[in-house]
Amino acid sequence: MFLKNCWYVAAYDRELEDGGPLGRTLLNEPVVMFRGSAGKAIALEDRCCHRQLPLSLGQVLGDRLQCGYHGLEFDATGACVSVPGQSKVPPGATIRSYPLVEKYGFLWIWMGDAAEADEALIPNWWWVDDSGWGHNPGAFLHIQCNYELITDNLLDLSHLGYVHTKTLGNDAIVDFPIKTERTDNQVRMSRWIEDKRPPPLFKTGGGFDGNVDRWQIVETGPPAHTVVYAGCGPVGAGKFGGCAEYDEGIHIRALNAPTPETDNSSFYFYAHVWDFRLDDADWTKQMYDGFLMTFLEDVDILEAQQASMLRDPQRPLIDLNVDAPGIAARKMLAEWIAAEKAGETIAAR
């Protein structure tokens, strides 16, 4: 079961550079996206109401999408406006349309009640549009795992020292405790690593020769919008273990928006921003390559984990201290889904 009344990323905006149509299954529902004649992105049910051929197999005609089977044409509202060979459109010849917003390099879709689709509920990832930050859009990742496993992974950064030794990880972090905080709409994990050597990507990017103070802060909210605040600074340059990052040093934001395709597969959309070496094209590429390597390492882990769980779904799991943020996030999401099922509106939360 999925939370419906929220924004999910349906695609990167660049995926519609040719106008579409682009078919994609989201939350077990077939969706097709395309750009109208003015460039506005549109999302419709990917199923013709005539004989159910996916409309993504058709073609874009101005502001309409034409079915590739019998030529029926649908406008941006999902209404059939033309049927070849007859002057009258049959009553009820409509398909569902979805609110779709283009922001931060993503196409955000609302899969629930369109009347509740408030653009203000899209996460505030302002760094993407700020000239004081470098920006790399992510690669397209299609993962054979449930999307909540991705959130678990992001909230459990202790795995960096074992999975990501070439980029973001080393064994210096595991002995430092984590702190978990929970509100109605957010889980926050924080860890502070004092006076330890930086991981390879931070050492190269920040030019650090010796040890650093380092922080890991992860904030996630329903359904799975997760920001990782990572960075490091000179030892003793700030209030170690406080709520805020050091002013001095390097700062990175990993913006994550996994979207369920089915119960056991997901699309992983992401971007990275940083506030150092902004005019260095080589570093920008290093950042892209380094984080892509990191994410592909996670893909291997997550897909193997999901396959193992599906082989023996009743096998009990044990929990460790590092699992506390992920457990809290799962509980939060379950509460939101239950409230939605009970008819509670977003405005009431």
Image: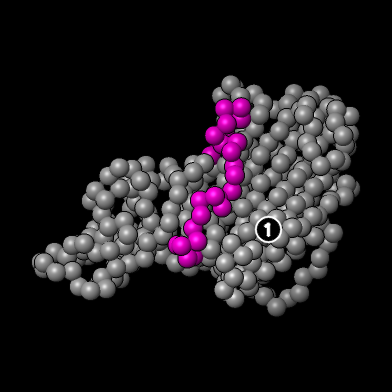
Magenta-tinted stretch: 111-137
Which residue corresponds to the image point at 81% horizontal and 68% vertical from the top-left?
318
Q: Is residue 280 above or below residue 175?
A: above
Per the image, the residue denoted by label 1 is 185
Image quadrant holding the C terminus, namely bottom right
Residue 275 colored in magenta in the image: no
Check the image and name the residue furthest to the front.
Answer: 348
**10 Å neighbourhood of mark 1: few (<14), some, or many (≥20)?**
some
Q: Nearer the viewer, residue 345 or 171?
A: 345
Q: Quadrant of the N terminus?
A: bottom right
Query: Count of labels shown?
Result: 1
Q: Quadrant of residue 194?
A: top right
Examine the image and state in which quarter residue 340 appears. Answer: bottom right
Amino acid type assigned to the residue bearing label 1 in the image: Asn
Nearest the eye: 202 or 335? 335
Q: How is the image coloured?
A: one colour
User: Which residue occupies the foreground of this view, 169 or 48?
Assistant: 48
The answer to which of 205 and 32 lies nearer the viewer is 32
Q: Secondary structure at mark 1?
A: loop
**What residue is rendered at 58% in x and 21% in y?**
279
313 in relation to 112, above or below = below
